[in-house]
Amino acid sequence: MSHSTYSKLWGEAHEELSSLLTQELPVEPLQPERDRVVFFQRLATLYVRYIQIFRQLEEAYDQVVQPQKRRLIREVLDGVMGRVLELKNEMVEKEFSEYHYMDDVIQDLKLMPEDLEIPIPRYFIRERSKVLRDRSKMLSNILDLMGVVEKPKPAGERTLSAEEAIRIIQVTERARQGRLRAKFMREIQRDQERQRKSKDRDLGASTMDQAAVCIQKVWKGFLQRKRTKQEREEEMIFLGMAMDQNLPQFCPAAAVSEATKTCRRTKQEEHEEDYQKSLISITNSLRELEGPNMRETMKDQIRQWFIECHDATGSFPDYPEEEDGGSALIFADKTPEQLMEELAAKEEEEANKKPKGKEETKDKGKKEKAKGGEEEEEPGLKMLPSAFLSELQKGQKTFTDVWQNRDESKNFNQRHEAELIKEEKRKEIEAEIRLQVDELMRQELANWKLAVDGDKGGKAKATVKKKKGSKSGKKKKKDKDLTADRTIESLYEELVEQGLLKPADNVKLQDYIGDYSYLGTTLRQTDIEPMPSLSDVRQVTALYAVLPLGSQVVHEKAPLVKAILLVGPSGVGKKMLVHAICQETGANLFDLSPLNLVGKYPGKSGLQMMLHLVFKVARLMQPSVVWIGDAEKMFYKKVPKEEKELDPKRLKKDLPKILKSIKGEDRVLIIGTTNSPLNADLKSLCKLYTKIILIPRPDYASRYIMWKQLIQRNGGVVTSALDLSSLAKISDGYTQGQMVRVVRGILTERRMQQLAKRPLVSAEFVAHLARTDPVFQDEEEALKAWYAKTPLGRKRVKAASGKDEEEAPAKGGKDAKKKGKK
């Protein structure tokens, strides 16, 4: 696509953003909403519309080649990402659920379920590609030195067990018996053929006619069935209900589009290099050409200000301090008297900033509480303050003032605009020169005062700068660095050698296959809590983990999520999600699972050193993911006898302390996975993991898509002979991992060679599924009951069952109080 296409896409995103900002930042504040359902609808609509802007801006940022435009798009893109996370957090607090169903909203906005998918910004990886390549190379070199890559063993060294040997003997013996039986049967058939031939010689012409008719009947039936099948397939293709298999799978237009996008990304790098060079050259030329004039103009203006103040007040003014802005205050549109009054007012404020007595502060606090109480009495739901709306408003204003109506007809190649660089750099150069001029003019003002006061016989007042003391008298103790004398490379190597830092598997979040839940809103309207779909799980993972880890701005300002717990039956893809998060953000993967820590860094000092190493490297080489598999073992109610020697509760005390030290600037995320959370102490588990994501078994729609894609990805071909609908229905209760194993077990090399003559059928998969145990309904119900006991689950249960209870205290509050006293 062309430059104009992406510029148009960018403009459409800002039009929608302008509409949303007008709605979110009205002239008069909105009244609180009493109806929780209406308020949630408003939140959900904003959330969906912001996601559409997010998708447009991400596409534009990936393909726009003009460097100055890309900087503005990046600022607005980060702001929109942060706003999406804020709205998600607010929906969770208002609906008391991590999963939301917005079927009615997307229907009103005429959108598809795919439009709700959270896009992963491609700049997360592209802009750190060099760093990630170097890190991957260092990791592979360390693993090669350790000899982690296992070499295939020679076939002669393999020893057979007794069962395998017996099975081989049985197979060979049965084959021998089969060959003998086949030999005997062949001889019997030959005898029968000789007898038949002797009888056929006596047959007449009538028998030959009957045989010909029989053959014609079979052949014509075969041809008609084949013709009918072909007509049916053509009709389905005509109706758009089936794909034409004769169409080429490889689309030339798609290949050209991808090549064009790659070419545009190359142009981005070239234009960025030119832009950086121009920044340096234009800054130097401005400093040489316009710098002296700026300096002299500032001096003349400041001297004029000295004279005007002296004429107006009879004395020279005090020069503004550097902390207050220096001479920048002088160039404001204010009279000398106003400036003198402002400076005097600031001095009074500083003098009045003294600690008040306890009584005054208490009385003041009571009054403020009383005032606040009066304001908060108005019932209703309000939106929480946002940290990103001001940034979005600023970005929208810049787009409107600079880019919306800019004539770019002469800038066909979309290179940088020199005039914009000059406008930006003039301000920086002016600020640099102002600091130099302020030092000179302070000295000049002191000389003027000394000269005037000396003539009058007075003494010059010495200006004494007061040093501002630190706000906090006590300095916080910094944590002692146990490895201050070591390089980060040596720490990285040690963690890899100990098996605490591992390479992430090459999987993406889109590989976590799952369809949208189409009945979520309907079920909730009938007071039935639906199980989330795998599409919802994928969406929540992108919001809570991928976006904050990928963007520093979003992680610092958005609601902070430090730890996530993934709960679900074995095989639903918890570990795959952890690896996908690392791949999408380029994060390091640290493995602190209880079984992985056995025998490593023993003792209390060893544990401290291990945690220090892990989190020091995680912070210095962020983003990082700390994975804790079998997270329930750390909080066992009672440690099983067979696991006492493994010490699974080793991190129980120290890990929560380290979690508190993680701040907004540290892009470090702790992810726990468990399939049996009932064995853990719920209170301790929920204290560490603030976000708990329940992952269910795949539903019918997800299984249908999963069977199709798994077969195709493993080299199989889906034909009309394979009834995917029945297969998806039969496989109810089976997890993704079990389905993957079944597909790989069926699509062997030999079976792949037979696909042309013998296509896949559902019966082949049923036999393999019968050998594995599914996830039964009891296990899923137990996980749902456990989740209902978590803090968010309890709130959800109360909200679902206590709608009428909230109104009762409001009507009969006095009676309730009297009964309580009795």
Image (tube, rainbow, N blue to C red):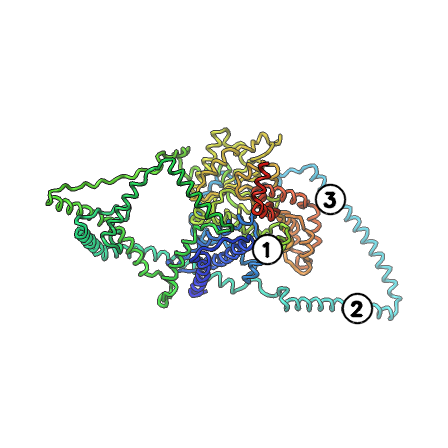
- Would you say 208 lies left or right of 674 here? right
Residue at 47%, 55% in the rendered image: 30
Q: Is residue 639 left or right of residue 171?
A: left
In the rendering, which numbered label is found on residue 172?
3
> Dividing the picture into quarters, in which one does residue 161 lie?
top right
- Lateral position of residue 476 relative to residue 468, left or right: right
Q: CA distance from mark 1 to mark 3?
A: 51 Å
- Sequence-earlier tag: 3 or 2: 3
Residue 790 falls in image quadrant: top right
Which residue is denoted by mark 1 in the rendering?
Answer: 516
Q: Amino acid at mark 1?
A: Tyr
Looking at the rendered structure, the kind of residue marked 3 is Thr
Q: Are marks 1 and 3 in contact (CB under 8 Å)?
A: no
**Residue 452 percent location from the top left of the image:** 13, 46
* Residue 711 visible in this rendered orientation of the protein: no
* Res 217 label: 2
Which is more foreground, mark 3 or mark 2? 2
Q: Which amino acid, by three-letter code, is at mark 2?
A: Lys
Whole-percent x and y of residue 393?
41, 56
Q: Secondary structure at mark 2?
A: helix
